[in-house]
Image (cartoon, rainbow, N blue to C red):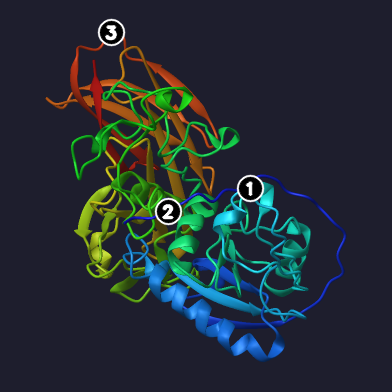
């Protein structure tokens, strides 16, 4: 029988703590810390003599995490570190005050552990939690300040955990499943797909009160892999809230993430990390170039099959696709300034870019003079958001990018005619009036410095 997960985070308190440093160890090193998502695992309730077991527990969790999609496909995007924090005593406190205590065969314990993790929070035994978030933050600041996400593993054999800024999970029954579920909350802001307590009910990636299949945020997945619009209950407030799936990890332990949650996780990965790992050359030259000029691109490949695609353009003309290296001859260049750009995007089928709101694109651009060589090298990452889609009257478009590049937006009919155009500055949101366009399918093209960096279907209804 599947187990219904009922773990949540309620509050945060701040306390003054003293700085202290501990042993930090990498258990997975995929690349430089500034080019990977750094997951940091801390232990609570491990005495100094038990820290080798903490390393084993953390490694087992990591292996379980990267055996499941979409983390399996994006394993190369993560580094994993452990911080070995010794506690004075083993385990976690169990005060025996939860309302469900009569059914819980756990001895009452008061444990002197480092972070103060304890069961029975807000009267729920399995809610394993600590209010010492300031202490956790201080340990991270003093030992690994470049972390992207932290997780607390508690040395206890009893089922328990909680979400929030720092997810917490025991190391007993279903330990890895609890931890991965809680990461769904903390890392991605996924909502529970069972009905949680009222304070945690809100619109999210996988929770909505929308019931129209053409408007619901996961409309692109309706009818695919059992995705639909499923009310949380048949009556009451819960009946007004909907989930996308009946058997997702955000509802049941041991289940896979549903397609909607997988997409949300991948979008979060794209938000944090560029798929471009390195490129060459990285520096300008001030002497006469030696031809051919060689250029190289290294990306953080997805597994087991790389889904990253790239397009190389020279002076806005495409010259190669899905190439790691190219060579430019002198005859390829004009006598004026030349621009070579490679555009990288993720073509995974685990996300649906055409219907999803956000497009993530990364670029590298070299400015070349045929007599002076490479004059400038720049890398940029673009987040382009377009909604709603389908749209009737107004189309909203937002832009974020590292280098403050201006984007040109062209809406093109299927016969190739440009029917609407606009320019978009960084951190700008614009609204285009498309009320006069005929109903049907259009292509929205996005250009940076004259180079096509992304295209997206638009449905006018």
Quadrant of the image containing the N terminus:
bottom left
Query: Where's residue 188, x and y in %?
Result: 48, 50
**Lower sequence index among marks 1 and 2:** 1
The residue at which mark 2 appears reads as 270
**Lower sequence index among marks 3 and 2:** 2
Seen in the picture, residue 40 relative to 52 is either above or below; the reply is above
Query: Where's residue 162, x and y in %?
Result: 58, 55
Position of 385 with respect to 255 (left or right) is right
Residue placed farthest to the top in the image?
436
Q: Nearer the viewer, mark 1 or mark 3?
A: 1
Residue placed farthest to the left in the image?
415
Seen in the picture, residue 335 relative to 416 is either above or below; the reply is below
Query: Residue visible at 78% across and 50% down?
Result: 13
Determine which of the numbered discs, if any, sits on residue 99 in the image.
1
The residue at which mark 3 appears reads as 436
Query: Where's residue 460, x and y in %?
Result: 24, 18
Query: Where's residue 318, x and y in %?
Result: 22, 52
Tell me if I can see residue 337 in this picture: no
Q: Nearer the viewer, mark 3 or mark 2?
A: 2
Seen in the picture, residue 189 relative to 435 is either above or below; the reply is below
Q: Callout 3 environment at 10 Å: few (<14), some (14 to 19), or many (20+)?
A: few
* Secondary structure of residue under mark 1: loop
């Amino acid at each position: 029988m599947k187990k219904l997960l009922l773990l949540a985070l309620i509050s945060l308190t701040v306390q003054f703590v003293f700085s202290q440093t501990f042993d930090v160890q990498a258990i997975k090193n995929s690349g430089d810390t500034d080019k990977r998502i750094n997951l940091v695992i801390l232990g609570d309730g491990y005495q100094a003599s038990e820290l080798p077991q903490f390393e084993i527990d953390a490694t087992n969790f990591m292996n379980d995490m990267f055996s499941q999609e979409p983390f399996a496909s994006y394993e190369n995007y993560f580094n994993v570190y452990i911080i070995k924090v010794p506690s004075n005593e083993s385990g976690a406190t169990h005060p025996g005050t939860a309302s469900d205590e009569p059914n819980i065969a756990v001895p009452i314990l008061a444990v002197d552990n480092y972070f103060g993790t304890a069961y029975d929070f807000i009267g729920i035994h399995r809610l394993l939690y600590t209010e010492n978030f300031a202490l956790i933050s201080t340990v991270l600041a003093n030992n690994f300040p470049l972390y992207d996400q932290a997780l607390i593993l508690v040395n206890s054999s009893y089922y328990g955990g909680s979400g929030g800024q720092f997810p917490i999970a025991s190391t007993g029954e279903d330990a890895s499943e609890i931890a991965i579920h809680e990461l769904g909350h903390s890392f991605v802001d996924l909502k529970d797909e069972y009905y949680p307590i009222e304070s945690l009910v809100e619109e999210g990636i996988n929770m909505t009160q929308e019931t129209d299949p053409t408007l619901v945020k996961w409309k692109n997945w309706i009818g695919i892999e059992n995705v639909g619009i499923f009310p949380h209950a048949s009556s009451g407030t819960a009946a007004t809230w909907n989930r996308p799936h009946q058997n997702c990890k955000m509802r049941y332990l041991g289940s896979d993430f549903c397609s909607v949650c997988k997409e949300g996780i991948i979008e979060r990965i794209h938000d944090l990390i560029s798929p471009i790992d390195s490129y060459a050359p990285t520096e300008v030259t001030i002497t006469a170039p030696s031809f051919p000029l060689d250029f190289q691109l290294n990306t953080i490949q997805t597994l087991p099959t790389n889904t990253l695609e790239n397009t190389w353009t020279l002076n806005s003309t495409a010259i190669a696709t899905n190439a790691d290296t190219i060579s430019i001859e002198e005859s390829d260049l004009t006598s004026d300034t030349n621009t070579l750009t490679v555009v990288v995007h993720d073509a995974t089928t685990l996300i649906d870019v055409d219907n999803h709101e956000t497009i993530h694109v990364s670029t590298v651009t070299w400015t070349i003079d045929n007599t002076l060589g490479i004059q400038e090298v720049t890398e940029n990452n673009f987040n382009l958001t377009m909604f709603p889609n389908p749209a009737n009257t107004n189309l909203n478009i937002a832009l974020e990018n590292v280098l403050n590049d201006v984007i040109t937006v062209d809406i093109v009919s299927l016969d190739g005619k440009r029917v609407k155009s606009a320019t978009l500055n960084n951190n700008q949101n614009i609204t285009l009036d498309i009320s006069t366009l005929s109903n049907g399918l259009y292509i929205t093209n996005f250009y940076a410095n004259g180079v096509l960096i992304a295209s997206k279907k638009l449905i006018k209804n």
